[in-house]
Image (spheres, coloured by chain):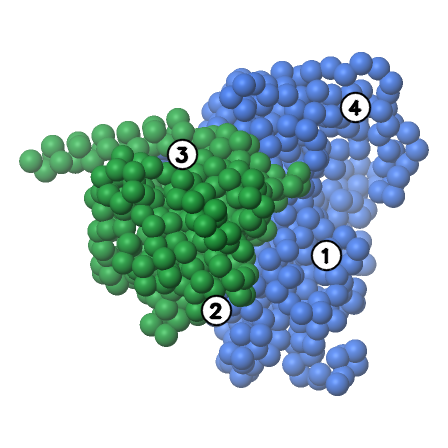
Amino acid sequence: MAKIIRKDVLTPQIKLMVVDVPGVARKAKPGQFVVLRFYEEGERLPLTIADYDPAAGTVTIIFQEVGKSTRQLGELEAGDDILDFVGPLGKEIEEKQFGHVVCVGGGVGIAPVYPKARALKMLGNRVTSIIGARSADLLFWEREMQEVSDTLHVTTDDGTYGEKGFVTQVLERVIKAEKPDLVVAVGPIMMMKMVSLLTRKYAVPTLVSLNPVMVDGTGMCGCCRVTVNGERKFTCVDGPVFDGHLVDYDELLTRSRSYLEEEKRALESWLMKKAQEEIARA
Amino acid sequence: MPKERLTGRPKMPQRPVKQRITDFDEVPTGLEDWAAVGEARRCLQCKKPPCMKGCPVDIDIPGFVALIAEERFDEAILKMKEKNSLPAICGRVCPQEEQCERECVLGKKGEPIAVGYLERFIADYEREKGIKAPVVPPPNGHQVAVIGAGPAGLTCAGDLARLGYRVTIFEALHSPGGVLVYGIPEFRLPKAIVAQEVNYVKSLGVNLEVNAVVGQTMTIDDLEEERYEAFFIGTGAGLPYFMNLPGENLNGVYSANEFLTRSNLMKAYLFPRYDTPIKIGRRVAVIGGGNVAMDSARTALRLGAEEVCLVYRRTKKEMPARIEEVERAEEEGINCIILTNPVRFTGNANGWVTGIECIQMELGEPDDSGRRRPVPVPGPEFVIPIDTVVVAIGQGPNPVFLKSVANLALNRWGYIETDTETGATNRKGMFAGGDIVTGAATVISAMGAGKQAARSLNRYINDPASFPQWRE
């Protein structure tokens, strides 16, 4: 059991939770993730660690409510318990001084890129960050990212906030102005693919953090397999951070859509049940 | 009591095929009292019982069988539990035909005593009556850690608790049982039974920490700091092997581990009541010939597949699965495509698997395993059209824990190297056993290793000098 000690609504669909898990907080490192299951019938939901505080014994998770599980999780409040909270899992990002590092966070990917930016900044890197979202109401942690970056750029696809356009447009400008030594990108698969294509053109080393369909998260099921440089890797134990230039994104994209129908079905049957409960209550 | 006279070994009653393939309830229903007693009375009560030589955990087989013959069931279960804390599990999934029953004198000329059926009978009898809490000895002041709550770890922990140790089992998943919960399907081993046997181990005073991934959540060094004096590693063989064929990452291609974990541990067969989905096509192919392949095929059938086939590169004779399991699978309509080896998976434009391209095989000379090696027959490739594939060709050692321990000696297959007599690894105070040492084997051999390690661990705590390899 892990108690939720704080909950913030970052945007209508994006929630932040600070969870009391001293064992996980003690070991957490940037780049790692946790798996949680919040009730008996629930699935094992992998979420990247957005922040951690070993002294306080807490781990912060940020998630966007998309399917049934994330919506249900979003209904929990401070004081509620999460049944299972496993971690930290996966490998940490290499912490060293690279020089000029660009951290790119897309959508809910801003959350996992944050601890990486902070760690890299603390190691003496010059950090330029680019965060982007579809629109202003999906954007969060601008101030937090500002605090751990020397320069911060903000984009929205629809221009409702910051610069109108994609993170890649800003990234290309940054690369041309001062070629970075490393790019770290976390976000939707398509965004990571576009970033990787761009940085390959300019020969900038790039790390991406993958988030495929996963079950156990400990290297046991092979569900999260991904092709990197022609080799089969298990994201949960070999990653989740990989060399962005070597990932087969098209395969990853296809595999990540494996359960779209089922996810829809689960969500619909849950919403139906909720509606019925509400009618019964009224 | 016997209301019918038995003329020989009883048949295990099982639910009719038509009924059982529609649900996940257990298939064999267990012997009735009269049949169990009758069977127990066939036992010759050998002075030097050969059956015991075939049992990795040294159960007093003639002893418990004699008590069943005398209808003293309460005593029979106590006799059993002197050596085996998990009889309801062993009575269901042990390959008795290759162990105790193979050695039975009666088997030389006729049919051996159905030791497995009797073991299950006595365990089920106790469960129905309510399991009594065992007598737990006073603590001996020593603390040990067991990594992995599978059959090896549970057995080792149970035996150590009975010696007065304070034992904590660290389990990576949210449910204890290891392969018993994620691997073996409900219809072969009901999870309520696993839970009950785990509770028995807990009632011996064993602590259980789930969601604890040793190697990630904590390391052996951390546990040493917490004053754990010795360790048993029973992390199993949970790394799925793939064939490395083109198209193997297409949607609809599962490892058996994923397929069974979704269905068993996560209860995907109850989707959407349970949140974890599983995708099943009209035609399913399972690649492999072991028990895991049988379990996968029978699971696929129960999940609603119309046609399920097994694709195996040798013949039925070489299949590593238990004969009983192959028979049940075939009864249920699973088709064995033998002497056939996949070379590639084909898919559609959306990235879903549509077929397996195969080549014909024949058997050549025996290989390292003693089985005749399958060799390709020259000829055209042919396609088996399918919607779902389950790759069940074996498992390896999961690297998460192994990578976290400095200088732990591994063998050339990546499993932990141990002293065969004691289960000792090259790391001081660290013992290992079960699939993480032998590679995928049976539940009972893992339990045997857990038992052996518990004995060694006890000796190590009391007399460290008797392990000269660890002298500083």
Q: Which residue is mark 1?
A: B415
> Are discs 1 and 2 located on one and the same chain?
no
Q: Colour of chain B?
A: blue
Q: Which residue is mark 4?
A: B339
- Most distant residue in the front direction: A177
Marks 1 and 4, how far apart at CA:
30 Å
**Residue at screen point 22% across, 39% down:** A160
Give the numbered dot on residue A123: 2
Question: Is A189 drawn above or below residue B149 in the view shown?
Answer: above
**Residue at screen point 65% across, 36% down:** B392
> Are discs 1 and 3 located on one and the same chain?
yes
> Are discs 3 and 2 located on one and the same chain?
no
Query: Where does the N terminus of chain B fall, quadrant-wise?
Result: top right
Instruction: Between residue A4 and residue B299, name the one nearer to us.
Output: A4
> Are discs 4 and 3 located on one and the same chain?
yes
User: Closer to us: mark 3 or mark 2?
Assistant: 2
Marks 1 and 2, how far apart at CA:
38 Å
Q: How many residues crowd around disc 4 within 10 Å: few (fewer than 14), some, or many (20 or more)?
A: many
Specify the chain shown as green. Answer: A
Marks 4 and 3, how far apart at CA:
35 Å
